[in-house]
Image (spheres, rainbow, N blue to C red):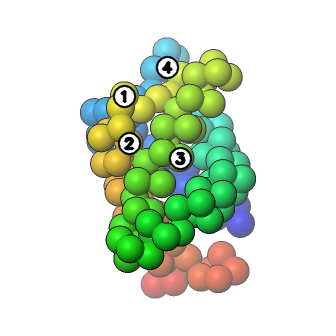
Amino acid sequence: MIIRFLVSALSLGLATWLLPGIWLDYVGEPADAAITMLIVAAIFGLVNAVVKPIFVFVTSPLLLITLGLFLLVINAALLMLTSWVCAQMGVPWGVDGFWDAVLGALFVSTVSFILNSFVGRRGEVHN
């Protein structure tokens, strides 16, 4: 579970570093940025655990019609919700707009999928 959390934090960190519409505003040491990204990953994990099942249930007909592609929109909405929660908590991380969230959701999903493919079911690393 800890390894999967770190994979999520790494994928969010890479999205923040590489995509211009997702930003981290920190002043200080790189360790401060790493701690902030761990906080963002925790918030994102909670949002995914609590809100995503509700979104998926409510939009299930749309998910069936689009053969699951609407999950990208749901993930973008969850990324924007994470940005809003971060702003409410004073965490200096955010997403600029919906299309930036869509690109970020696609990026985070892809990177998480790739990184999780190297991690086994119980956290062992595959070569």
Dot 1 corresponds to which residue?
Answer: 96
Q: Tell me the quarter of the picture where residue 125 sits.
A: bottom right
Find the distance from the CA under tag 3 to the CA under tag 1: 14 Å
Instruction: Give the spatial CA distance, label 3 vs label 2.
Output: 9 Å
Between circles 4 and 2, the one closer to the viewer is 2
Answer with left or right where residue 95 lies relative to residue 3: left
Closer to the camera in the image, 122 or 69: 69
Residue under the point 55% across and 38% down: 81
Crowding at label 1, few (<14), some or many (≥20) Cα neighbours within 10 Å? few
Question: Label 4 belongs to which residue?
Answer: 26
Q: Amino acid at mark 2?
A: Ala
**Which residue is found at the position 66% from the left and 51% from the top?**
51
Do labels 4 and 1 touch, CB within 8 Å?
no
Q: Residues within 10 Å of mark 4 (few under 14, many from 20)?
A: few
Label 3 CA crowd tier, 10 Å (few <14, some 14–19, many 20+): many
- The residue that disc 2 covers is 101
- Name the element at disc 4: loop
**First in sequence: mark 3 vs mark 1:** 3
Residue 98 placement: quadrant = top left
The residue to which callout 3 is attached is 78
Of labels 3 and 4, the one closer to you: 3
Q: Is residue 48 left or right of residue 113?
A: right
